[in-house]
């Protein structure tokens, strides 16, 4: 069980809650760092029979009420088919224990049954009232199993015309049906009506020197429905993606190429490939090769312009099984990991050179066990007898990352709309990448129903555009590839107390220029595995040092720089 105090009220007034996005307030994104200044207390490890509630917290904005919950075991909070200890949230909306449903000292007018995905209103004036959680504009993260959850409800909701939250003060309790409840120390929470400003994301402004990638599930044969074309054109013409991964697109590549050439005109015609009935990959760059990996996975090698890039790009289009098909979804995650490991060993038809950037995109349908996402990122294969032992997926023997995109106009990360069902809005669509040589510079999700009239007019959108296109929203990211990642100058060099520049990528000669040094500068050229190839240095008064890379194979090398007691290493790409 847990005890919680009014400390969070003081802390919230003292701190301006911000996230990694530079946004204010609580972001529903499965990251939780924005809760760090909303006071919670750890459990004292009480003995309970069943699930143990460890932490709980509450806060609010002008329009929404937010809850945080931490428990001692991984569950899928809104689905009883995962062996869950079912969870209930009781909210006393009038601070009167004699009204509503009595539970552990409070009288709850609102009862949220997460497992049944319903809420119940207990009031003398409203009898037998139950509705889907979506009627409360219910948002939850994550949509997989977890030990941590964040929840959002709209404060202006009504039940049969009666406000759900008639007062500015509430009490609340989380409860598991067979175990714990919390917080132990039940206290009133007074609405703060915090004014959190979400800064809208510019849709049109692609970051310079990036590849703009979009993933969009178009709902079966959505691209064949000509009545929807005006909406598609309005959205796609403003996004102007370079590469698109279409899911549930059982349409011809000819149709996709024709539509993209019309909606997003390019100097050269769009090219599309389709290796299974689930996924089409379209690119404004030439596609060198593609291969069938499975009914749900396609691999593609994209030829990026030599004038701008020193590398090709691997795109893996994916569409994992939906709903409760956890075993089949894990199979596809394992198959993906096995395929990436084969790519790294150049054991596929794509003939991949070492350190080629990899992007994997699509509708992963991650609504079950979190292990599936773990496998997609880390290569932790579960069905080892079929797919091998697994291993780190990135070229530097670390894990992949995924883009945590938010709606362009709201602090939400879901890509599937569950408003017309009992299932909550969910993050199903992902952009995964090899972060050793790719950086996500900008990302967003487009949901026109969440945009203001001014923003809709700014882009020429209609409020219904994304709703009629599909039940999934487009997810977009501007990805910077290794040949455009400047590691030669900037903050890293400033940390050394000098000005540093060098040519990168490198051919046969590396010329290092150093200014502003007050001591000798020691330099070293190392192979990728850390073997010293050549040592050098720059004495006081000198400004240059040259290394020869003649005879060395193309790939990754390291330049090590030491100035006084400070040392840094910089990645080099020999071409």
Image: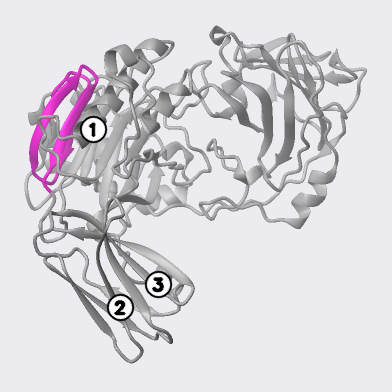
Q: Residue 532 or 187: which is nearer the viewer? A: 532
Quadrant housing the C terminus: bottom left
Q: Are marks 1 and 2 in contact (CB under 8 Å)?
A: no
The relative height of residue 130 versus residue 242 in the rendered view (above or below) is above
C-alpha gap between disc 1 and disc 3: 40 Å
The disc placed on residue 316 is 1
Front of the two marks 1 and 2: 2
Quadrant in the rendering for residue 2: top right
C-alpha gap between disc 2 and disc 3: 9 Å
Q: Does 158 sit left or right of 268 as displayed?
A: right
Q: Is residue 514 magenta?
A: no
Q: Residue 564 or 187: which is nearer the viewer? A: 564
The residue at the point 8 percent across, 53 percent down is 267
The relative height of residue 515 versus residue 71 in the rendered view (above or below) is below
Q: Along the polypeptide, which appears first: circle 1 or circle 2?
A: 1
Q: Which element is circle 1 on? A: strand
Using a 10 Å C-alpha cutoff, classify the residue at mark 1 as few (fewer than 14 neighbours), some (14 to 19) or many (20 or more).
Answer: many
Q: Which residue is mark 3?
A: 562
Q: Along the polypeptide, which appears first: circle 1 or circle 3?
A: 1
Q: Does 77 sit left or right of 275 as displayed?
A: right
Q: Which residues are magenta?
A: 275-303
**Position in image of residue 175 (x %, y %):** 75, 18
Q: Which residue is mark 2?
A: 537
Q: Which element is circle 2 on? A: strand
Front of the two marks 1 and 3: 3
């Amino acid at each position: 069980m847990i005890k919680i105090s009014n400390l969070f009220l003081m802390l919230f007034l003292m701190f301006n809650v911000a996230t990694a996005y530079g946004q204010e307030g609580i972001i529903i994104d499965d990251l939780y760092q924005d809760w760090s200044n909303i006071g919670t207390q750890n459990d004292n490890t009480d003995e309970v029979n069943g699930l143990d509630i460890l932490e709980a917290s509450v806060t609010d904005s002008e329009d929404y009420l937010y809850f945080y919950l931490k428990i001692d075991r991984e569950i899928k909070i809104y689905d009883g088919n995962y062996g869950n200890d079912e969870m209930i949230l009781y909210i006393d909306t009038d601070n009167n224990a004699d009204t509503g449903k009595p539970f552990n000292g409070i009288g709850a007018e609102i009862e949220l049954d997460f497992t049944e995905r319903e809420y119940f209103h207990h009031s003398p004036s409203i009898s037998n009232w139950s509705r889907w959680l979506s009627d409360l504009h219910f948002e939850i993260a994550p949509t997989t199993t977890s030990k941590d959850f964040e929840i959002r409800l709209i404060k202006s909701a009504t039940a049969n015309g009666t406000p759900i939250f008639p007062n500015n003060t509430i009490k609340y309790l989380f409860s598991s049906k067979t175990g714990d409840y919390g917080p132990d120390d039940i206290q009133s929470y007074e609405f703060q009506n915090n004014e959190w400003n979400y800064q809208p994301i510019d849709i049109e402004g692609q970051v310079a020197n990036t590849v703009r990638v979009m993933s969009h599930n178009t709902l079966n044969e959505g691209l064949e429905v000509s009545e929807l074309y005006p909406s598609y054109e309005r959205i796609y013409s403003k996004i102007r993606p370079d590469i698109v991964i279409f899911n549930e697109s059982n349409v011809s590549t000819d149709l996709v190429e024709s539509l993209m050439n019309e909606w997003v005109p390019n100097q050269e015609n769009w090219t599309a490939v389709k290796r299974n009935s689930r996924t089409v990959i379209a690119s404004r760059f030439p596609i060198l090769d593609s291969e069938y990996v499975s009914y749900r996975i396609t691999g593609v090698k994209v030829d990026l312009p030599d004038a701008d890039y020193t590398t090709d790009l691997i795109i893996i289009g994916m569409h994992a099984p939906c709903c409760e098909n956890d075993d089949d979804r894990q199979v596809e995650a394992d198959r993906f990991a096995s395929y990436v490991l084969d790519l790294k060993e150049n054991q596929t038809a794509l003939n991949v050179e070492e350190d080629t950037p990899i992007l994997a995109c699509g509708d992963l349908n991650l609504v079950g066990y979190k292990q599936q996402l773990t496998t997609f990122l880390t290569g932790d294969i579960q069905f080892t007898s079929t797919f091998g032992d697994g291993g780190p997926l990135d070229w530097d023997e670390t894990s992949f990352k995924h883009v945590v995109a938010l709606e362009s106009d709201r602090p939400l990360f879901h890509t599937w709309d569950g408003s017309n069902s009992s299932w909550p809005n969910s993050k199903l669509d992902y952009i995964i990448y090899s972060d050793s040589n790719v950086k996500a510079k900008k990302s967003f999700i487009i949901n026109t129903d969440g945009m203001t009239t001014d923003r809709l007019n700014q882009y020429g959108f209609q409020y219904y555009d994304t709703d009629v296109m599909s039940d999934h929203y487009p997810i977009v990211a501007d990805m910077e590839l290794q040949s455009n990642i400047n590691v030669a100058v900037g903050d890293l060099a400033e940390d050394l107390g000098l000005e540093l520049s060098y040519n990168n990528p490198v051919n046969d000669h590396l010329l290092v220029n150093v200014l502003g040094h007050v001591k000798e500068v020691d330099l070293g050229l190392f192979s990728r595995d850390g073997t010293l190839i050549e040592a050098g240095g720059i004495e006081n008064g000198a400004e240059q040092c040259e290394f020869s890379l003649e005879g060395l194979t193309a790939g990754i090398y390291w330049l090590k720089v030491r100035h006084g007691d400070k040392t840094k290493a910089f990645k080099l790409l020999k071409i």
